[in-house]
Image (cartoon, rainbow, N blue to C red):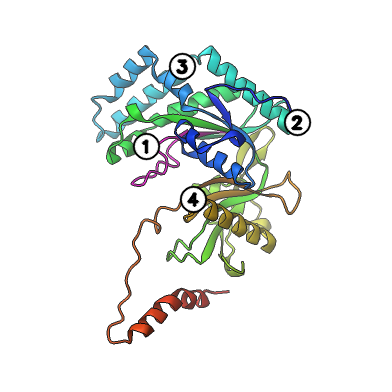
Amino acid sequence: MATRPRSPYTLFFEEYSPDQQPRLGGKSASLGSMIQAGLPVPPGFAVTTDAYDTLRSHPDLRAGVHAHLDDLDHSDTTALTEATREVRKLIEEVPLPTEIAAAITRCYESLCEQCDDDALPVAVRSSGTAEDMPDASFAGLQDTYLWICGADQVLEHVKRCWSSIFTDRAVSYRRQRGYDHRVIDMGVAVQKMVRPQAAGVAFTLNPADGDRSQVAIDASWGFGEAVVSGEVTPDNYLVDKVIYEIVSRKVSDKRLEYRLNGNGIEVAEVDEDRACQPCLDDEHIRAVARMARRAEKHYGSPQDIEWAIDADLPEGDDVVLLQSRPETVWSNQRPTARSHIGTDPMEAIVNTLCSPLSARQKQPS
């Protein structure tokens, strides 16, 4: 492979180090960290926040953003939608500085060479610096673009990711949480696309009750967008973390999927027979659970991951990790003390220690 291009505006995931995290945003830093840990993450590179900063310092653009947002009545949803639409248009119309466009193009060409594809399809994914803060999660508020081919399209969609920091939902959420849009930075992740047979999410605890002895997996046909957006009721599996026994399975009627259509992605109906079939076999279920567990061990806390079964990879190596973020619901709750009034202190301790096991034994098989 040729020598990797170097620039302050880009960084390949395998070159990640923790000191780079502030320049990459949450998503790109996570992808780089997972690749460094040997997790099966598709290759790619980050567009750093240095690139976004050059755009934000553009005097006309800065003045336009302030004019639209500084005195905005956020309770007026129509005005909010119109103002954010105009801000996004301003950002997308500003030409990329030559040195930034050249740096992104060189990295994309290098990734194409690595993957032996001159027009490699990539995902272009927003990577905000405020994602998954201790008191807020901005994940999902900015945009992701799938199956982007060619350097010109990559450059266009990098700017669209930047502009998505000013969607109406993102601006409203930041205001509710007290974050100033003038100090929020945006990185972008550019990553080789997978061709998923099935995809979904997994939690390294049971989201129904917070039980950390289980991995919960939601899965559906095709790309995972139908699961993340809630457009389908996915298949659901609970897997024991220690012995990887599948302790619960629920197969749903999955009537739509996001799938490839030529050089793009379409939403399509799933035929009746396939819709009601499980989209994962037992080996894939266990492989997803093991990968989720590895991500949890790497980060040292419960994780919420996105995964896919890549049809382009050989069986046994086809489970890939697309994203991992901290689980924020149960992980932020303090354990609830159980009352053992009238019992022996040692008995209370034994009951407390055994209660997760009892809960697991009651799970349907």
Q: Earlier in the sequence, mark 4 or mark 2?
A: 2
Q: Identify the amino acid type marked 1.
A: Arg
In the image, what residue type sits under mark 3?
A: Glu
Q: CA distance from mark 4 to mark 2?
A: 35 Å
- The residue under label 4 is which amino acid type? Gly
Secondary structure found at label 3: helix
**Tag 1 residue:** 169
Query: Does residue 135 belong to the magenta stretch?
Result: yes
Q: Position of residue 310 (x, y in %)?
A: 68, 46
User: Which of the image's four quarters has the N terminus?
Assistant: top right
- Look at the image and give the residue range highlighted in magenta: 123-142
In the drawing, does residue 218 fall left or right of residue 79? right
281 inside magenta stretch: no
Real-space Cα separation, disc 2 to disc 3, in angstroms = 32 Å
Q: Answer yes or no: is residue 82 visible.
A: no
Which residue is tagged 2?
116
Mark 3 and mark 1: Cα distance apart in space = 21 Å
Residue 309 lies, in percent from the top left, at: 66, 50
Observer able to see residue 184 = yes
Q: Nearer the viewer, mark 1 or mark 4?
A: 1
Give amino acid for label 2.
Asp
Which of pointers 2 and 3 lies earlier in the amino acid sequence? 3
What residue would you read off at disc 4? 230
* Depicted 140 relative to depicted 339: above or below: above
Question: In front: 347, or 218?
Answer: 347
Q: CA distance from mark 1 to mark 2?
A: 39 Å
N-terminal label among 3 and 1: 3
Q: Which residue is mark 3?
A: 93
Residue at the spot x=47%, y=75% of the render?
359
Q: Are marks 3 and 1 in contact (CB under 8 Å)?
A: no
